[in-house]
Image (spheres, rainbow, N blue to C red):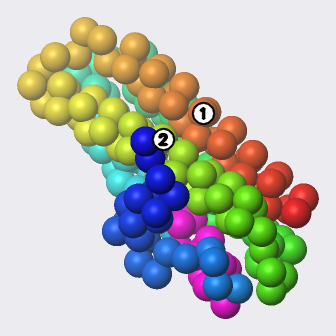
Amino acid sequence: MVTTTSVIEFLGKLVPGYDYRAKRSRLNTDRSVREKLARELKKSAVNLKEVSDLAYRDGKREVVDHIKDILKAIDLFIVEIEDSPFGQSPLFKQDGVSDEDIDHMIEFDRLLVTELEVITKTSELIYDHVLKGETSDIIIQVRKLKKELDVMKNTSSDRLDYFMKR
């Protein structure tokens, strides 16, 4: 069973200073989480741009079009992450925040990081497959990646809704 403590330790390894329990740390923790998400999504985009370039050189226009669509979605999501108004959330201004609220904040971050890992690994696999010349299922993999990105975007929206309604 996954405990809150083990999740906090896991997130603390990825995001230095991760701590929602102390009021003075909440805003910085949120900002650090969002910066980590944006950085990792940018790395995935770099892999996909390289795949697109290789596909373009090989005349695989359909692959280029699919990748172009997901790159646009990633770019828009990064802007959304970076420009989120989380600092206005009452959760960052209150001295006493319930353990339930903190657990929800941590759970949203865990979900986002888990989804981010899937996106990162999938983009790396796509890149590796193209380098090996295994391109038969690239469009299917790009579509799966797009679906994972959509799941992550929905989780991020749910996180924003939760933070702003508290």
Image quadrant occupied by the C terminus: bottom right
What residue sits 43% from the left and 42% below the top?
1
91 sits left or right of 11 in the view: right
Q: Outermost residue, right direction?
A: 165
- Label 2: few (<14), some (14–19) or many (≥20) C-alpha neighbours in 10 Å: some
Looking at the image, tell me whether mark 1 or mark 2 is earlier in sequence order. Answer: 2
Q: Outermost residue, top direction?
A: 136
Residue 67: % across, % down: 44, 30
141 sits left or right of 146 in the view: left
- Residue linked to disc 1: 151
Q: Outermost residue, left direction?
A: 132
Residue 114: % across, % down: 45, 44
Pointer 1 with pointer 2, Cβ within 8 A: yes
* Mark identifier at residue 86: none
Q: Where on the picture, by quarter, is residue 69?
A: top right
Can residue 30 be spotted in the picture? Answer: yes
Task: Assess whether residue 31 is covered by the magenta stretch.
Answer: yes
- Residue linked to disc 2: 115
Most prominent secondary structure in the magenta stretch? helix
- Magenta segment range? 24-34
